C-alpha cells in the first residue's frame, strides 16, 4: 500500500507490470490525493477563458473551436453527466491537435499536463510490444480504475491512436459508457481524449475538393468530413480503432477534424512564435519563414505539408 492508504503504482498497474518493473518506469505517475483537489473551478468561467484562447491563438480551425467548446460547455455545465466526455481529434501533423488538447487541460487543471490528475499515454512509449498486448490491457484497466478512485475528475489523453495496437484500447470501454459505477468507481466526470494523424490525408483531400468547389473554409461542416474520417480511421486494420467497440457502441461524443493550414495561417504561426521567443516581428522574416515550408498540391501549393509544426525550428535560420 502507498502513503495514506492509497495503492502504489505497482499494485494499480497490475501483475503484468509488477513482473516487469522496467515497463512501469515510462507510465504516468499515480500519486496520493492531496488534501484538496488541485483542479481549477469547472464551469462557465473556464469555458469562456478557453473559448477566448482558442479564438485568439488557434489559427485556421473554426470547426475545432465549435466542436471542442460545444462538448466542453455541455459537460462542465452538467453537475451530473451521464457519461465521461470522450473526444477524438483527427488531422495531419502540425494542425493543432496537441496544442488544443494541452490548452484544454491547462484550463481545467492546475499545472496543466503536469497535474497528477492528467494521464498521457503514447503507444510507442507505454505499449511498444505487440506480444504483451494482454498484459497492457490489464495494466491499463487497473491504472485508469486506480486513478479514477483517487480523482473522478481525471483526464486521460491517448496520443498517436493510429499507432496503437488494434484491440488494446477496447479494454477501457467500461469507463466510457453511461453506467453509473464501474468496478466500484464513479467515473462519469472524467475526460478522455484520443489524438490521431489517421484521417488527416482524407480531411486534406475533402478540404481541397471543397476549396476547388469554391466552398469557404468557414462553411465546411462536420458532415462534409465525417464519412472520410470514418473510412480512414475506423475501417483501417492498422488503426487502434479498427473493429473497436468504442466505435460500434458510439462512445465517442465528439469527432474533431483539424483542417490543413494555408499560407496565411502559417504566417500567423510565425508571428506568434516570434512574439513567444521575444524576437522582433519583421514582415520580411515572417514571409521568408512561411515561404520556406513545403505546400501541396504541387500545382496550387495551397496547404502546408507540415502545418505549423516546423515553424519554431525554422525561425533561427532567419536571425
Image (tube, rainbow, N blue to C red):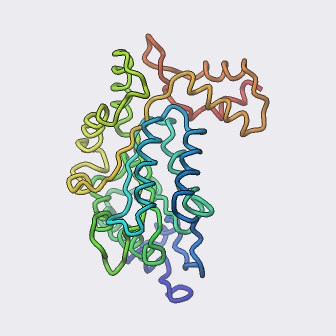
**For this view, does 1 lie left or right of residue 316?**
left
- Point out the residue furthest to the top here: 299
Kindly identify the residue that appears in the image at 28 percent across and 52 percent down. Answer: 166
**For this view, does 234 lie left or right of residue 210?**
left
Kindly identify the residue that appears in the image at 45 percent across and 12 percent down. Answer: 300
- Residue 123 place in picture, x, y as percent: 41, 54
Kindly identify the residue that appears in the image at 51 percent across and 40 percent down. Answer: 96
- Residue 116 place in picture, x, y as percent: 56, 68
Give residue 167's quadrant in the image. Answer: bottom left
Kindly identify the residue that appears in the image at 74 percent across and 38 percent down. Answer: 277
**For this view, does 39 lie left or right of residue 283?**
left
Q: Out of 284 and 159, give the one closest to the viewer.
A: 284
Q: Out of 215 and 294, give the one closest to the viewer.
A: 215
Give residue 33's quadrant in the image. Answer: bottom right
Q: Out of 97 and 313, give the one closest to the viewer.
A: 97
- Residue 154 place in picture, x, y as percent: 47, 67
Amino acid at each position: 500500500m502507498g502513503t495514506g492508504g492509497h495503492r502504489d503504482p505497482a499494485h494499480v498497474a497490475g501483475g503484468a507490470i509488477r513482473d516487469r518493473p522496467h515497463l512501469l518506469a515510462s507510465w504516468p505517475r499515480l500519486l496520493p490525493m492531496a488534501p484538496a483537489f488541485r483542479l481549477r473551478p469547472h464551469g462557465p468561467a473556464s469555458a469562456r477563458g478557453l473559448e477566448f484562447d482558442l479564438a485568439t491563438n488557434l489559427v485556421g480551425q473554426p470547426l475545432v473551436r465549435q466542436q471542442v467548446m460545444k462538448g466542453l460547455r455541455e459537460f462542465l455545465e452538467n453537475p451530473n453527466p451521464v457519461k465521461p466526455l470522450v473526444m477524438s481529434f483527427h488531422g495531419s501533423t502540425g494542425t493543432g491537435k496537441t496544442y488544443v488538447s494541452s490548452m484544454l487541460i491547462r484550463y481545467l487543471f492546475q499545472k496543466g499536463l503536469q497535474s497528477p490528475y492528467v494521464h498521457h499515454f503514447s503507444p510507442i512509449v507505454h505499449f511498444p510490444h505487440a506480444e504483451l498486448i494482454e498484459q497492457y490491457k490489464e495494466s491499463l484497466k487497473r491504472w485508469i480504475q486506480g486513478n479514477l478512485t483517487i480523482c473522478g475528475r481525471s483526464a486521460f489523453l491517448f496520443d498517436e491512436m493510429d499507432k496503437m495496437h488494434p484491440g488494446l484500447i477496447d479494454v477501457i470501454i467500461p469507463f466510457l459508457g453511461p453506467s453509473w459505477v464501474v468496478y466500484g468507481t464513479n467515473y462519469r466526470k472524467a475526460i478522455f481524449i484520443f489524438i490521431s494523424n489517421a484521417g488527416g490525408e482524407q480531411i486534406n483531400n475533402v478540404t481541397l475538393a471543397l476549396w476547388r468547389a469554391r466552398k469557404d473554409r468557414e462553411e465546411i461542416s462536420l458532415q462534409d468530413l465525417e464519412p472520410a474520417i470514418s473510412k480512414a480511421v475506423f475501417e483501417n486494420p492498422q488503426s487502434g480503432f479498427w473493429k473497436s467497440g468504442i466505435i460500434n457502441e458510439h462512445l465517442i461524443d465528439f469527432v474533431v477534424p483539424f483542417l490543413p493550414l494555408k499560407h496565411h495561417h502559417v504566417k500567423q504561426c510565425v508571428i506568434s512564435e516570434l512574439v513567444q521567443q521575444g524576437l522582433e516581428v519583421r514582415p520580411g522574416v515572417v514571409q521568408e519563414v512561411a515561404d520556406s515550408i513545403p505546400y501541396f498540391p504541387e500545382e496550387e501549393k495551397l496547404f502546408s505539408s507540415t502545418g505549423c509544426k516546423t515553424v519554431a525550428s525554422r525561425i533561427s535560420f532567419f536571425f
